[in-house]
Image (cartoon, rainbow, N blue to C red):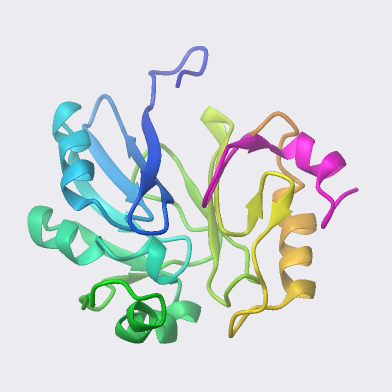
Amino acid sequence: MTTEGLPAMIFESYPVGPLQCNCCIIGDPISKKAIVVDPGGDAQKILHTLASHQLTLVDIIHTHAHLDHILAAGELKAATGAEIHLHKGDLPLWEMVEQQCQAFNVPLTTLPDPDHWIEDDAALNCCNGIAIHTPGHTPGSVSFWFEQQNLLIAGDTLFKRSVGRTDFPGGDFATIEKSIRERLYSLNDDAVVITGHGPETTIGEEKHQNPFVSV
């Protein structure tokens, strides 16, 4: 992924784990620092991707704390020393990871405590990204915006022609609708959206074609 006049940002995204969450690896080609977003499984595959680009993982960040987005966080931290970031609103879900595993019949996983709380509009430690608090799917749902690359990582807030479920505990449709309308739809129409599951889309497409939240 390139932006005219800027060094290319190292970027890879692929589905991982038992529920095929889209995990993103983002690296700075100059500093060789990297962040991983939503390591929902397949830690060894993620580590191989980092090594193939000669990247040093500094942060493990999460769009939210449903099990399919967090399962490999502890293994990545143990392997790299990277710090775990989460919005505090999702701490109860993080602490219930074992119960989540039981509910979805996946092998039990224990996780270390998060190292840092993600704050709204806070800068990320790589590629000039910022965090955008987008609650509704969960209370602590966060999206990550990389303005220079015109790239949004939306987690389970916004999908291609859909939005995140709000029937789980802590979900609320009015809240997710507000997050999408006020925070995400204010971004560039041609911004590429990496969703939590499934294919990518653009902000403009969803503004006009999303049957749940359109303008």
Q: Quadrant of residue 157?
A: bottom right
Asked if residue 26 is among those painted magenta in the image, a careful observer would answer no
Left or right for 201, reference 74: right
Total count of labels: 0
Closer to the camera in the image, 87 or 211: 211
The part of the image, by quadrant, that contains residue 207 is top right
Report whether 41 appears left or right of 145: left
Residue 173, image x, y percentages:
76, 73
Q: Quadrant of the N terminus?
A: top left
In the image, 203 versus 66, the foreground residue is 66
12 up-or-down from 153: above or below? above
Q: Position of residue 179 (x, y in %)?
A: 71, 63
Return the residue found at the far left.
Answer: 79
Q: Is 194 included in the stretch rendered in magenta? A: yes
Q: Identify the residue at image location x=52%, y=12%.
A: 4
> Which residue does the image show at 31% across and 46% down from the upper left?
35
In the image, the segment drawn in magenta is 192-215
